[in-house]
Image (cartoon, grey):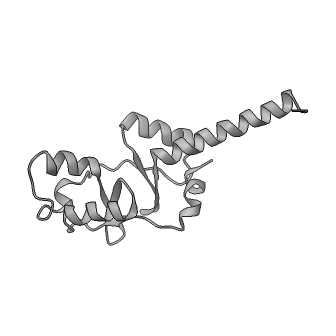
Amino acid sequence: MIAREILKNRQGIVRSVAPGATVFEAVKAMDKFKVGALMVIDKEKLLGIISERDYTRKVMLKDRSSKSTKVSEIMNCKVIQVDPEANIEKCLDIMGKNRIRHLPVVENGKVLGVISSTDLLVLTVSQKDHIIEQLERYIAPGF
C-alpha cells in the first residue's frame, strides 16, 4: 500500500494553521480535530509543522504564554515529507529514523494529507492479520 491509498478516505482534508495564529489557537484546533499536530500552511505552501510536543517543550516548559506566542515562533521548519507513491515500509522507515509521528504527503508542493504513526500501525497489523488468515486457510482449509 502506498501513501496515496492511505489518504484515500480522508477526502483531501488537511488540518492546518496559519503561521500568524497563536499557539493557543493551534492547540485548540488540535483538540477540536483530535489530532496531535497541524501543518503550518500559508498560501498553500507548507512552512512547518506544530505538534503537542512543540507546545509542551517550547511554550509550557519555558513559561511562555500560548495566547501571545505565534505558531511561527515555535513550529518545526524542517518538515520531513514523502511523495504519494511512498509505500508503508518507506514511511515507517522515515518516521523511525527521524523520530517523528506525523508525515506530510506532498505532491507538486501541495500537501495532500498527513500520515500518522497510528495510521501505519493499524494498517500494518491489519495486513499481518490478513496474511495469517490466508495462511491458516491454506494450511488447514477445513477449519
Provide residue 108's location: percent of width, then percent of height: 46, 62
Residue sitting farthest toward the front = 143
x 42%, y 35%: residue? 96
Q: Is residue 40 visible?
A: no
Instruction: Give the left or right position of residue 143, taking residue 121 as reference.
Output: right
- Decide which of 18, 57 is in the foreground and name it: 57
Instruction: Give the left or right position of residue 63, taking residue 140 as reference.
Output: left
x 21%, y 68%: residue? 21
Question: Looking at the rendering, which quadrant does residue 128 occupy?
Answer: top right
Question: Looking at the rendering, which quadrant does residue 7 occupy?
Answer: bottom right
Provide residue 64's location: percent of width, then percent of height: 9, 54
Instruction: Give the left or right position of residue 65, taking residue 41 as reference.
Output: left
Q: Quadrant of the C terminus?
A: top right
Q: Is residue 62 visible?
A: yes
x 31%, y 65%: residue? 29
Residue sitting farthest toward the left = 63
Residue sitting farthest toward the bottom = 43
- Decide which of 42, 136 is in the foreground and name it: 136
Q: Is residue 8 above or below residue 135?
A: below
Provide residue 119's location: percent of width, then percent of height: 51, 48
